[in-house]
Image (spheres, grey):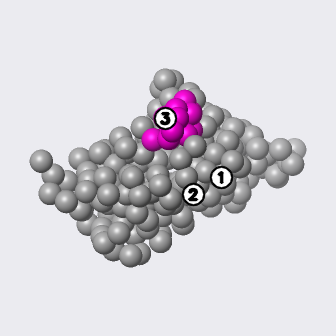
Amino acid sequence: MSSPRRGRRPGAPDTRATILEAAREAFAAAGFARTSVRSIAAAAGVDAALVHHYFGSKDDLFVAALDLRVDPREAVLPVTAGGPDGVGERLMRLFITVWDDPEARLPLLALLRGISEPQAQQLIRDGFLRLVLEPVGDALGVDQPERRLSHVASQLLGLLLIRYLLEVEPLASMPADQVVATYAPVLQGFLTDPLP
């Protein structure tokens, strides 16, 4: 009689998709911090080693679960590389470039449409704040990062709702350069100017 097989389950063609679906559900329900790779593996019916095999780290799995066309961890690097001067414009230009791309926008709009649901709220907090804005604050060494980044988030999320979800004119059809010119000084102020 053979002993039960240990280690990772051989990967079936749908194993990666099963892991991704379990990860989406777990991250949406519990958030990034309270979700473990082991719990995702258990929900998917695989060994944690197989999760690591397919996705690497928990951060990589989270980005894959968001189904983004652009990895925010890489996209934000040029924003912070230039230092504090002009960071508002670089951040706004990145934001508009991603959201104005119809293919990149589709999965993001699906997430935004569900913003009233606690699961979507958690994914937006973890995905947007943790993967995009917190690295900007960390790289710039901003004082009062929670306060400053929540102000930046309020502007960007408000812009998302008005321009892309509700499509309110004239903002919905405003050229990207004009949107950047309008919002970049506000973001710059929130990131580098003295706060009231």
Q: Foreground: 35 or 125?
A: 125
Q: Amino acid at mark 1?
A: Asp
Outermost residue toward the top in this view:
116
Q: Which residue is mark 2?
A: 97
Asked whether residue 170 is drawn in magenta, I would say yes
Residue 42: horizontal and vertical position, in percent?
Answer: 64, 38
Q: In the image, which disc is placed on residue 101?
A: 1
Residue 121: horizontal and vertical position, in percent?
Answer: 47, 32
Q: Is residue 138 left or right of residue 81?
A: left
Position above or below: 19 against 95: above
Residue 120: horizontal and vertical position, in percent?
Answer: 52, 32
Q: In the image, which disc is placed on residue 162?
A: 3
Which sits earlier in the primary sequence, circle 3 or circle 2? 2
Determine crowd level at label 1: few under 14, some 14-19, many 20+ residues with C-alpha closer than 10 A: few
Residues drawn in magenta: 159-172
Q: Is residue 95 left or right of residue 102?
A: left
Q: Amino acid at mark 3?
A: Ile
Residue 4: horizontal and vertical position, in percent?
Answer: 78, 45
Q: Secondary structure at mark 1?
A: loop
Which sits earlier in the primary sequence, circle 3 or circle 1? 1
